[in-house]
Amino acid sequence: MIKNFIKVLFALLIATPVFSADLGGRILDIGSDTTYPPHESIDPNTGEVVGFDVDVVAEICKKINCKPNWVTTAWDGIFAALANKQFDMVVSGVTITDERDKIVDFSDPYIIVQQGVLMRVENKGSTIENYKSGSLSLASQKGTTNAELGEELVGRANLKLFDDFSAAVLALQNGDVDGVIIDSTSAAAYEQEFAGELTVGITGLSSDPLGLVFQEGDSLQDAFNEGLAAIKNDGTLDNLIIKWWPK
């Protein structure tokens, strides 16, 4: 009996994850440019912030005992605002780059995305060369890695920048630009929303890891890495990817 009890207890200890990170129910202010579906956007019916990133943070908080408070903020200056402690962290479909890492800290990657070009369906079949030559105009959101890649590919003169992606997509719909360079995950959401009007015509321009962002030296980085590892290992993260990008 005692041996069996010890075996059962040992099995439970192995099966039950033990978290060293416990934030004690702490409320975390999270800065986010909530104009980037399906990563984060405002539900027009509820006014709440929803999206893949929102679900990822919620699941991590279940593991490490915290409560997210989403704070909508403009993308321009978001990292400086974090460094100045206006937020506890930033979650906004952020690509991990060496340049950004100089002023903030990143979690381990939680998803890897491709960059591509969203365009009107009548322009399907267009290539980067069409945009580089100036026969078609390309747009993106300023201050993003998408904009950096766009400038590298077609030149600054052939790239129009907007404050947020929703404005760039609206310009695309109105015919003011002919393509928007954007992460493929978000491009797919726009393609679905505006089926028959917009399409992801160019894909695989680059591969970018996205990370959660923290103030330099903040212990939240370690806590969230622990929680992120847990939702990767138990399949939760895979299920969220399927939820937001069903095949």
Image: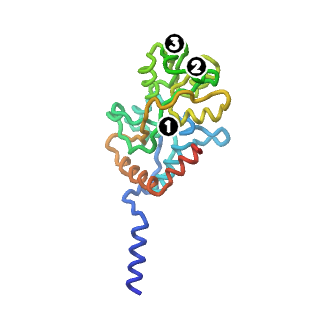
The residue that mark 1 highlights is 32
Q: Is residue 95 left or right of residue 70?
A: left
Q: Considering depth in this image, is 33 or 135 the residue closer to the camera?
A: 135
State which mark lies toward you, 1 or 2.
2
The residue that mark 2 highlights is 178
Q: Are marks 3 and 2 in contact (CB under 8 Å)?
A: no
* C-alpha gap between disc 3 and disc 1: 33 Å
- In the image, residue 61 sits, relative to residue 33, either above or below, namely below
CA neighbours of label 2 inside 10 A, class few (<14), some (14 to 19), many (20+) = many
- In the image, residue 48 sits, relative to residue 74, either above or below, namely below
Q: Is residue 215 left or right of residue 38?
A: left
- In the image, residue 130 sits, relative to residue 204, either above or below, namely above
Q: Which element is circle 1 on?
A: strand
Q: Which element is circle 3 on?
A: loop
State which mark lies toward you, 3 or 1.
3
Question: What amino acid is at disc 3?
Answer: Gly
**Percent position of residue 198, x then y:** 63, 28
**Tag of residue 134:** 3
Mark 3 and mark 2 lie on one chain; the one further toward the N terminus is 3
